[in-house]
Amino acid sequence: MSSALMSTYQPLPITIEKGAGVWLYDTEGNQYLDAFAGIAVCNLGHCHPHVVQAIQHQASLLMHTSNMLTIANQEKLGLQLTALAHMEQAFFCNSGAEANECAIKLARLYGHQRDIKNPSIIVMENAFHGRTLATLAAGGSRRAQAGFEPLMSGFVRAPFDDIAALQKIAAQSTDIVAILLEPIQGEGGIRTPDPHYLTQVRQLCDQHEWLMMVDEVQTGMGRTGHLFAHQSAHIIPDVMALAKSLGNGFPIGACLAAGRAKDVFHVGNHGSTFGGNPLACAAALATLEVLQNNPLLDHVQQIGAYLQHQLQRALNDLPRVIEVRGTGLLIGIEMDAPCRALLALCAKKGVLISVTAEKVIRLAPPLILTTEHADKIVQVLSDVISEWV
Ligand SMILES: Cc1ncc(COP(=O)(O)O)c(C=O)c1O
């Protein structure tokens, strides 16, 4: 079939027509268990009735007015999100990259307000923060950056999960203003740091008055069994980027600020035409309501542990599997070679998976996954990987 789309993606020839819960249905009448939830987006499952109803209601009332006028849903969402995160202020945008752009701008302004002429942000090897020019430069993928030089300056790269490397930078540099990192690296291959790492980063940031900026675009909204993944370390960041599942499929992003990151922006410093519009905020408010009213976080911890355990039992001895790892319902299966071919093979057997960092199968199913769903994922993966040559 001819296409008028730019060739930025290589989609499977499967056209999904509708979705409900963990299930997706294509135009040929096939049913799939969605084991990656639109890249960690539809955390409550597809077309959650409460979110659908909130969107329908708001769409019939008012969709957009701009930030030139007060938006009641945005005010309400700001209060709810900051309370849940124990943070203080929110800026709303439309995607994860935009949420990180906001964080990067905030950190630079914070630096200039402290008379630091060339404010620099420490970023991590293997990090992923988005595809805009600033977030591309902040990310650690040379492959994603290639061809888009000159890359934006103002970033200092450090190995992930290596506090000594950060201390070394602290001893050598005077223009650092912030550290930007994912609590668990998602696109980088589902890499969870040492349990003390985030606490140590927090301490280092406090010691040097740097902003600790966490990118929870992929790990946030319950994905790891905590509302936000950094909460497992009992810390509060200065800045947090959110998007993906914030609207359970409706596009919305947020940059939250607290402590020394509060009140850095003033009128005119940042903006967005669509950011925080009534419709997107209605979707996010409904998503938050469901997340808060269900014992979903405990469920994620239990079902995530079950899925990971069953995967380890079924896959660990297969010759091509290097490791099964992850937290909550963000699970990676590292293979011994690039494994994109597995996408179509699993789809043929009715399970949709994703692959990241070339060799890592990423599972990020809706958080409402049951043991029966988990068993199906394990069965299909184990069959497909055993037969994979
Ligand atoms: C950690 C992280 N940050 C930022 C982004 C970019 O989000 P978006 O694609 O909504 O711009 C992603 C997307 O995968 C991500 O995983």
Image (cartoon, rainbow, N blue to C red):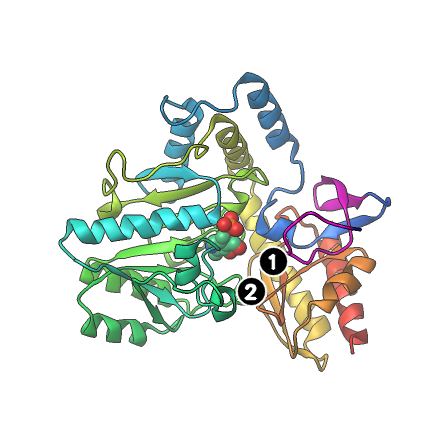
* Whether residue 194 can be seen here: yes
Badge 2: how crowded within 10 Å, few (<14), some, or many (20+)?
A: many
* Amino acid type of the residue tagged 1 in the rendering: Gly
Badge 1: how crowded within 10 Å, few (<14), some, or many (20+)?
A: many
Q: Nearest the camera: 185 or 109?
A: 109
Residue 67, picture quadrant: top left
- The residue lying at 59 percent from left, 40 percent from top is 249
- The residue lying at 47 percent from left, 48 percent from top is 96
Q: Is residue 253 magenta?
A: no
Q: Which residues are magenta?
A: 2-26
Contact (CB < 8 A) between labels 1 and 2?
Answer: yes
Decide if residue 305 is on the left or right side of residue 216.
right
Decide if residue 68 is on the left or right side of residue 383.
left
| Of the image marks 1 and 2, the number of the one nearer the N terminus | 1
- The residue lying at 72 percent from left, 79 percent from top is 318
Q: Is residue 14 magenta?
A: yes
Tell me where residue 218 appears, x and y as whole percent. 51, 53
Q: Quadrant of the C terminus?
A: bottom right
In the image, which is nearer the foreground, mark 1 or mark 2? 2
- Quickly name the residue at label 1: 304
Q: Nearest the camera: 47 or 271?
A: 271
- The residue lying at 41 percent from left, 67 percent from top is 195
Q: Which mark is residue 326?
A: 2
Position above or below: 223 against 341? above
Main SS, magenta residues: loop
Position above or below: 215 against 252? below
* Amino acid type of the residue tagged 2 in the rendering: Gly
Tell me where residue 270 appears, x and y as whole percent. 32, 39
Q: Nearest the camera: 187 or 113?
A: 113
Most extreme residue toward the top is 61
